[in-house]
Image: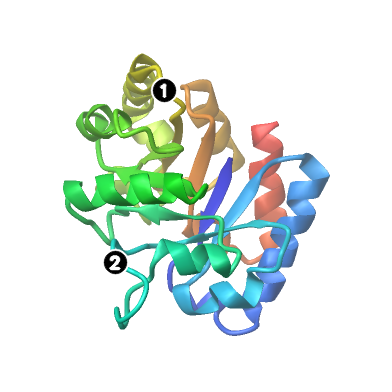
Amino acid sequence: MFIINCKNYEEISGEKIVKFVKTAEKISKKYRVKIAVAPPQHLMGVVSNSPITVLAQHVDDSKVGSTTGFVIPELLKRSKVSGALINHSEHRIDSKTISNLITKLDELGMISVLCVRDVAEVKRYSRLNPNYIAIEPPELIGSKKAISKERPELIKMAAAAVKNSKNRTKLLCGAGIMSGEDVSRAMELGSIGILVASGIVKAKNWNKAMTEFAKSMV
């Protein structure tokens, strides 16, 4: 799994998100790597008909109906969005909300990608059985210092914790991933994929950057 979090970067604003997603489609098909894209919330509808997996960057534990301003799983699904990131370091939520959202996404047949900061949170939340847990030390996010180089022991310990949970959850890693070498090392340490943002979105050549990452996964 190769997830690209577009955040609110200007590089994919407006119609540029269409070109970005089409590039991801091409690379995914060529290298047979599952790529998911998480666009800014207001651009999800622009790309939701794409064959690529589209994820929300955040989702709220709120109800259908009179809930102005909330992003809810039920309507995301009807808009062909496949799932959501939960609890990203830039949008943290409480543990009860995390539990409720994983349950709700599961009931709807949607993908849950739970972001955590450390191994203690991996152990704590793996029992909730999300589809994926992505470990991202906050201090490395956007730092251009890859977790696979700076904190390799975190990936090893997180992989062991996920394995010990004996459920469906798979480990992703992120934070500072900038090259194919970073990706390969993360996979060697026990991750089955990556969650990346600026390393792809801010690249001068999206095709080249996505190709490098995808080739490193296969």
Which residue occupies 37% across, 62% down? Answer: 58
Q: Position of residue 52 (x, y in %)?
A: 68, 57
Identify the residue position indicated by label 1 in the image: 167
Between disc 2 and disc 1, whose residue precedes? 2
Q: Which residue is mark 2?
A: 62
Q: Residue at x 29, y 28 (%)?
A: 127
Q: Position of residue 27 (x, y in %)?
A: 75, 51
> Where's residue 203, x and y in %?
59, 63
Q: Residue furthest front?
A: 65
- Left or right for 201, reference 173: right
Q: Residue furthest right?
A: 30
Q: Is residue 202 visible?
A: no
Q: Secondary structure at mark 2?
A: loop
Mark in front: 2 vs 1: 2
State which quarter of the image contains the N terminus.
Answer: top right
In the picture, residue 213 is in which quadrant? top right
Say what secondary structure mark 1 lies in: loop
Q: Tell me the quarter of the image containing the C terminus.
A: top right
Colour convention: rainbow
- CB under 8 Å between callouts 2 and 1? no
Q: Is residue 104 visible?
A: yes
Residue type at numbered disc 1: Asn
Give the vertical position of 95 relative to 65 (above or below).
above
